Image (cartoon, helix red, strand yellow):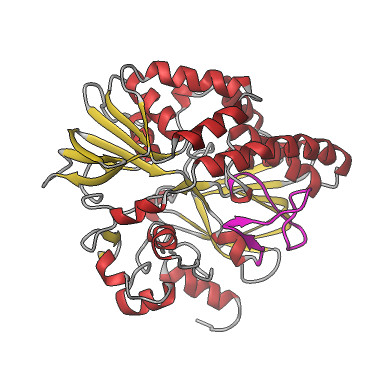
Amino acid sequence: MMRDYFDIAVVGAGPAGIAAAVTAAAAGLRTGLIDDNPAPGGQIWRSGAHLSRQARRWLTALDHPKVVRLQGWCVFDSPEPNLLCAEQNSAAAAGGVRFRAELSFEKLIVATGARERFLPFSGWTLPNVLGAGGLDAMVRGGLPIAGKRVVVAGTGPLLLAVAAHLARRGARIMAVCDQASVLQLARLAANLALSPGKLWQGAGYALAMGPARLRTNCWPVAAHGSDRLRAVTLRQVARQWRIDCDYLACGFHLVPNVELPALLGCRIENGFVAVSDSLETSVPGIYCAGEPAGIGGIELSLLEGEMAALAASGQTARAGDLSRRRRAKLAFVSALAEACRLNPELRAMATDEAVVCRCEDVRAGELRDRADWRDAKLHTRCGMGPCQGRICGTATEFLYGWGPADSRPPVFPARASTLAAEIDSAGIANH
């Protein structure tokens, strides 16, 4: 078992976590950056061949002697204050042997990012029905997409970005469908007028998409095929039609990863970690940066990462300067949330036969009469598979109004031997 101590521990190596680690290290503090991916960058900075100058600059700065990078490590528990337990994942383990680590810290910055929200509909478990960000990542990783017919659907600015990238790689974009209304998107565009850079970026995406145009008030109601996806049925107002396609990239905006901060006792409000003006959570000494505190994009995540590290390292004046800049950007967070507010009609996508919990193969018809999340678990095993409810949990929250389940260790699946070692180190059992 590995043990280590950090002045500041940062969990999550996306833009917010990288900015936090670089800033803390620049202050002369020994900083641990812990992330379950094999390389830093999160989901947004995955590909070394296509990184922006901004991304390369931050990743270069991360190569600092005060930064200890624990890539391929997953935090699964915090058995006592100022202590994290992590397990090395199989991809990072040398010789197939995975290790456990106890990481103690003075201050902690949670920058665990966000994941795509998926909503169930008939056929969404077919091969080649993928998350929008998931398909984009696979193409960046080498999946051939040239000449393939792709439908992009869901909600959020990721749709345009993904459609544009796939089109540049030679994909035939058959349709881009956003469940948001024209009014919702118009309000977002009005807010973006204060950020010309984002408007130009959106215009670039639209040009790259080619002849495909954005359809509003539009979403998939069924995916068709036997061995893999062959076609998708779309709905727009009262009209439904079918489009032949090879891939459906579908995601209904983002869901913050708040399982770890919830386990640490941080207050969660409206699905996000509640933070002060200095980004400190309700637990003293624990800060939160990036999407878990509010979905606002890369620029806000970088700003919050710097700000959290400054506050955690006692540089209150500099943190205050960034806090004023952050407040100016929070209007976009609210505007984006409103633009991505889900249409209640989307609940009709989940017919009785639609799979809701993919891990345990639980269908919507089995869940309609369940009282809450716990009742569903007890009677159907919904949410008890490897993803621990990260997919079906957010879906059932929207479909049935269930609140999130209590966060209990392990917050990510861990090996029995790792958990046994944790019990042994606590003195509860001796071997």
Give the side of residue 24 with respect to residue 172, left or right.
right
Residue 326 lies within the magenta run: no
The picture places residue 393, in percent across and down from the top left corner, at 42, 62
Residue 278 lies within the magenta run: yes
Q: Nearer the viewer, residue 391 or 44?
A: 391
Which secondary structure class fits the magenta region best?
A: loop
Give the side of residue 151 with respect to residue 277, left or right.
left
Quarter of the view holding residue 166: top left
The picture places residue 103, in percent across and down from the top left corner, at 64, 59
Magenta span covers which residues?
Answer: 265-291
Q: Nearer the viewer, residue 217 or 13?
A: 217
Quarter of the view holding residue 53: top right
* Number of dots carrying numbers: 0
Q: In this view, which residue lies farthest toward the right?
A: 317
Q: Nearer the viewer, residue 335 or 356?
A: 335
Using the image, determine if residue 304 lies above or below residue 73.
above
Quarter of the view holding residue 137: top left
Residue 156 seen in render: yes
- Identify the residue shown where x is 53% and y is 36%: 41
Q: Nearer the viewer, residue 239 or 154?
A: 239
Q: Quadrant of the N terminus?
A: bottom right
